[in-house]
Amino acid sequence: MTSVRKKIAAAVGGAGLLLGIGLLLACPAFAQYNNNSARNQTKPEVLIDPGMIYNDHPMNWIGKSVELRNVTVQDTNDSGNFWVGSDNDHRLLVVKEKGENDNLRAMKFHKGDIVTIYGTVRAASRYIAEANDADKGSVHDAEKTSGVVLLADSISVNSSTQR
């Protein structure tokens, strides 16, 4: 609490203390801290099969944090993003989130790589493609199939087909 709030609480007594706590809780910085810590405590849903997303009502997954563990890269595109899944009709587009993580953006993946991906399921859209420099054709294909993409904020390669 700031010194002004402490003085008010001391001057008014118990009612002032409640008022001071109310002011503290109403403080935007405190509210932002609470929202961020609640978000960070949300654990991603761990999946080993991307089919859980694209086969089972994909729109219900929008906004959910997921960890796709030990999945195989099914195909890649020139923008550095890639597909995971079993074939061209059963797959999920993984889009590397544009932001402060230049290492993620620089990573290149190859068909057959085994990767673990942390991210959030988002609706496939032109906006997602433009905001993350993703291949518009791939995002359009994702729109037509599952309707969603996995916006990745972290990817690790567990086994690579390249030496």
Image (spheres, rainbow, N blue to C red):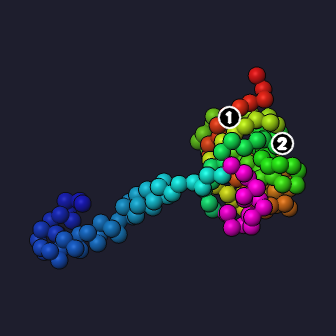
Left or right: 77, with 107 as reference point? right
Left or right: 31, with 127 as reference point? left
Residue 75 circle label? 2
114 or 110, which is in the foreground?
114
Q: Residue at x 78, y 61 (%)?
A: 55
Image quarter where the N terminus lies is: bottom left
Sort mark 1 into few (<14), some (14-19) or many (20+) by Cα contacts within 10 Å: some
Magenta segment range?
48-62
Q: Secondary structure at mark 1?
A: strand
**Looking at the picture, does residue 80 appear above or below residue 148?**
above
CA distance for labels 1 and 2: 15 Å
Q: Residue at x 41, y 61 (%)?
A: 34
Whether the magenta-drawn stretch holds residue 122 is answered as: no
Q: Residue at x 62, y 43 (%)?
A: 154
Image quarter where the C terminus lies is: top right
Residue underneath mark 1 = 157
Residue 102: image quadrant is: top right
Percent of width and height locating residue 112? 80, 36
Q: Is residue 118 visible?
A: yes
Whether label 1 touches label 2, CB < 8 Å: no
What's the residue type where badge 2 is placed? Asp
Q: Is residue 125 visible?
A: no
